[in-house]
Amino acid sequence: MSTVLITGASGGIGYELAKLFARDRHNLVLVARSADKLAQVATELQAYGVKVKTIALDLAAPPVPKFLFDQLHREGITIEILINNAGFGAFGEFAEMREEEILGQIGLNITALTELTRLFLPTMIARRSGRVMNVASTAAFQPGPLMAVYYATKAYVLSFSEAIANEVRGSGVIVTCFCPGATHTGFAHRSGTENSRLFKQFGVMSAEKVARDGYRALMGGRTVAISGAHNWVVVQSARFAPRKMVTAISRWIAEKAG
């Protein structure tokens, strides 16, 4: 059995991905902030006959990714598949946003993801086997007024993932950037976007369906995958429309419905 490390695994897309990997007989290392939620998930997934290790950590703190890597190394746990799923967004004008919200998004969405990839990728290359999936968003393809930092962090994830996918080409290692659109998870509540036009008026996908798309993309060796046909159309449209128009539409979608 191979071992999969999934961050942000206590709910939403991360939890649904964990179920898919467990069903296919992969052992799991699950990381999230809530020890209680992780324990519930572990109890459920152990029914598939796999080993489930849970580690409650806040990956946004700078030394934590290295601490996690060192702990797994000391315990002799080899990670064959890394799923960088943890991330969050915050709604509001940038000039009025609290510093901890700004730096927290950068710390989790960019710094932790980058550091975990840096730590686990070399051993995968040395083994000539491994997979990394970095979860970005359809937000990666355009600016996002009222969520400027979140959109920018996801643009980083997309660019970073495409670049290293090219660097490891031929090494036996697969790097996939997965880009979901609006999804029924705890994200909208935490980010303050529950009443936005995006979540009220546009197609919101189930976390289960999104996870299946991500799982197939990773195991199929795709470099960039967008979940949902309607999201793919929106992304392609944004590529060719004038940037000011794209930015204006992005703001309109983020604003409150009604």
Image: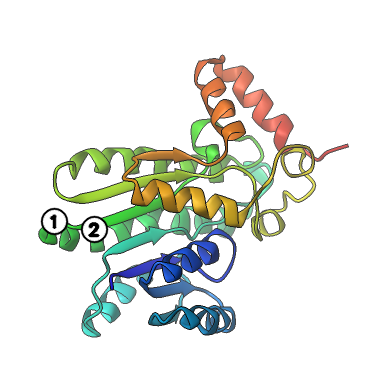
In this orientation, which residue lies closer to the viewer: 92 or 127? 127
- Is 236 left or right of 5, judged from the image as shown? right
In this orientation, which residue lies closer to the viewer: 56 or 145? 56
Q: Quadrant of residue 99?
A: bottom right
Mark 2: give few (<14), some (14-19) or many (20+) Cα within 10 Å. Answer: many
Residue visible at 57% across and 33% down in the picture: 229
- The residue that disc 2 covers is 130
Badges 1 and 2: C-beta atoms under 8 Å apart?
no
Given the image, on which type of amino acid does mark 1 rest?
A: Arg
- Is 204 left or right of 88, judged from the image as shown? right
Residue 69 in picture, x, y percent from top left: 28, 73
Residue 255 in picture, x, y percent from top left: 76, 37
- The residue that disc 1 covers is 128
Q: Secondary structure under badge 1?
A: loop
Quadrant of the frame with the C terminus = top right
Given the image, on which type of amino acid does mark 2 rest?
A: Gly
Q: Secondary structure under badge 2?
A: strand
In the depicted structure, whether residue 108 falls above or below residue 204? below
Residue visible at 54% across and 66% down in the picture: 15
